[in-house]
Image (cartoon, rainbow, N blue to C red):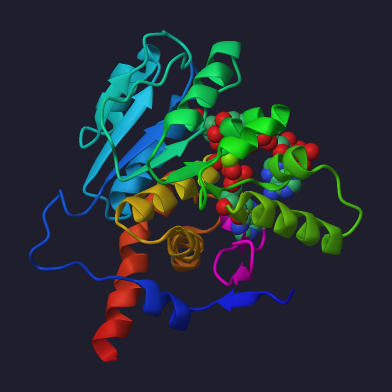
């Protein structure tokens, strides 16, 4: 199982420049579901990253306590609140978005667990599953069978361990992850240094990124980027590959300008524009 490297050449084959006739309706609508009291930053970061990945419309689905926080942090986003104050208890969107990212900052309340199960049973939009949604699934492994095919899971190594159990060697970690992606027919973005993407058949190794990304919220931002790309009608594997590449590239571009200490999750979002511009320059020269 030799990984294929995710290089700029591959990325330029996937990347779709914007059409002149574009309007916000053609650029996709993504929904980020998550947040709980004290963890609203995660949804704010993921939603802003989704918008700045190029998505036309973004909605946050959050508990009531996050309403003012999110509307103030990100006026470009729309907000739908749960009936519950501090955690999500029932997911009623009333819209059918082009992609949904679920789990960041969501916590693992009993009501939230039940809401996730009902959501997975009924959801028809392409999905990205991260953080607490992954942890809840690890505690209720039979729920994994409810995941629609080509759903994208984005575990860091601890979340991965909760899903597949401990491994004795790197080889075993890769084999178990590959087996899970094959059995469930899902895409697994195994976050780390570097990040690998499994699609059940092949494994792809990211070539961008550096330790500046070892900062709170940087995975929440990745969830927002991949969800935004999915909503812009990139296929799930393309969105995963392009998402991890862009995410790492922001850190590579920023590092000489910011230094790693002052690089935070918001800096990833800030540098998305420069990362995209580097693609446009290559296309212009081609
Ligand atoms: N501003 C906000 O609102 C923010 C909200 N957030 C939200 O908080 C929730 C909890 O998420 P979380 O990831 O912090 O908790 P959890 O799953 O227990 O993992 C932590 C443990 O895992 C390990 N570990 C992690 N990475 C690893 C790696 N690459 N390689 C190896 N190990 C690794 C590490 O273990 P250690 O190495 O310390 O033993 C660490 O102790 C979640 O909903 C998230 O969205 C956060 O995003 C922050 C900003
Ligand atoms: N040393 C590193 N080199 C490259 N990427 C890293 C490094 N440390 C962390 N990252 C990236 O940062 C992100 C961290 O995600 P995660 O642990 O979910 O953060 P959070 O939950 O705080 O948002 C992942 O995309 C991971 O690949
Ligand atoms: Mg995370």
Q: Please provide percent x and percent y for residue 72.
A: 26, 26
The one of 130 and 277 positioned closer to us in this rendering: 130
- Residue 198, magenta (yes or no): yes
Q: Is residue 91 something that shows in the picture? A: yes
Residue extending furthest toward the right: 168
- Is 216 above or below relative to 235? above
Q: How many marks?
A: 0
Give the residues drawn in magenta, as a range: 193-213
Would residue 154 appear left or right of 47 to someone viewing this image?
Answer: right
Does the magenta portion include 199? yes
Relative to 261, residue 121 above or below: above
| Rendered view: 69 above or below 180 | above
Looking at the image, residue 13 sits to the left or right of residue 251; the answer is left
Examine the image and state in which quarter residue 173 appears: bottom right
Camera-side residue of 214 and 186 = 186
> As drawn, which residue projects farthest toward the bottom?
286
């Amino acid at each position: 199982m030799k990984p294929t490297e995710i290089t700029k050449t591959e990325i330029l084959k996937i990347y779709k420049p914007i059409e002149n006739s574009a309007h916000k309706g053609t650029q996709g609508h993504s929904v980020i579901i998550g947040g709980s009291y004290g963890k609203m930053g995660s949804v704010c970061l993921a939603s802003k990253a989704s918008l700045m990945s190029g998505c036309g419309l973004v909605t946050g689905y959050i508990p009531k306590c996050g309403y003012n926080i999110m509307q103030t942090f990100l006026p470009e986003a729309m907000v739908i609140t749960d009936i519950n104050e501090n955690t999500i208890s029932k997911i009623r969107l009333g819209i059918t978005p082009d992609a949904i990212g679920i789990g960041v900052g969501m916590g693992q309340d009993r009501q939230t667990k039940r809401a996730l199960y009902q959501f997975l049973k009924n959801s028809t939009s392409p999905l990205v599953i991260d953080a607490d949604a992954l942890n809840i699934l690890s505690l209720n492994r039979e729920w994994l069978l409810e995941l629609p095919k080509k759903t994208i899971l984005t575990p860091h190594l601890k979340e991965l361990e909760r899903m597949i159990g401990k491994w004795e060697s790197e080889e075993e970690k890769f084999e178990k992850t590959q087996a899970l992606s094959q059995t469930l027919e899902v895409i697994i973005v195994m976050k780390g240094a570097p990040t690998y993407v499994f699609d059940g058949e092949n494994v792809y190794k990211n070539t961008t990124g550096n330790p500046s990304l070892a900062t709170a919220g940087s995975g929440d931002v990745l969830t927002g980027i991949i969800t935004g790309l999915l909503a812009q009608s990139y296929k799930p594997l393309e969105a995963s590959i392009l998402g991890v590449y862009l995410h790492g590239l922001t850190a590579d571009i920023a590092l000489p300008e910011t230094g790693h200490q002052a690089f935070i999750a918001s800096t990833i979002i800030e540098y998305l524009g420069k990362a995209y511009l580097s693609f446009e320059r290559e296309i212009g020269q081609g």
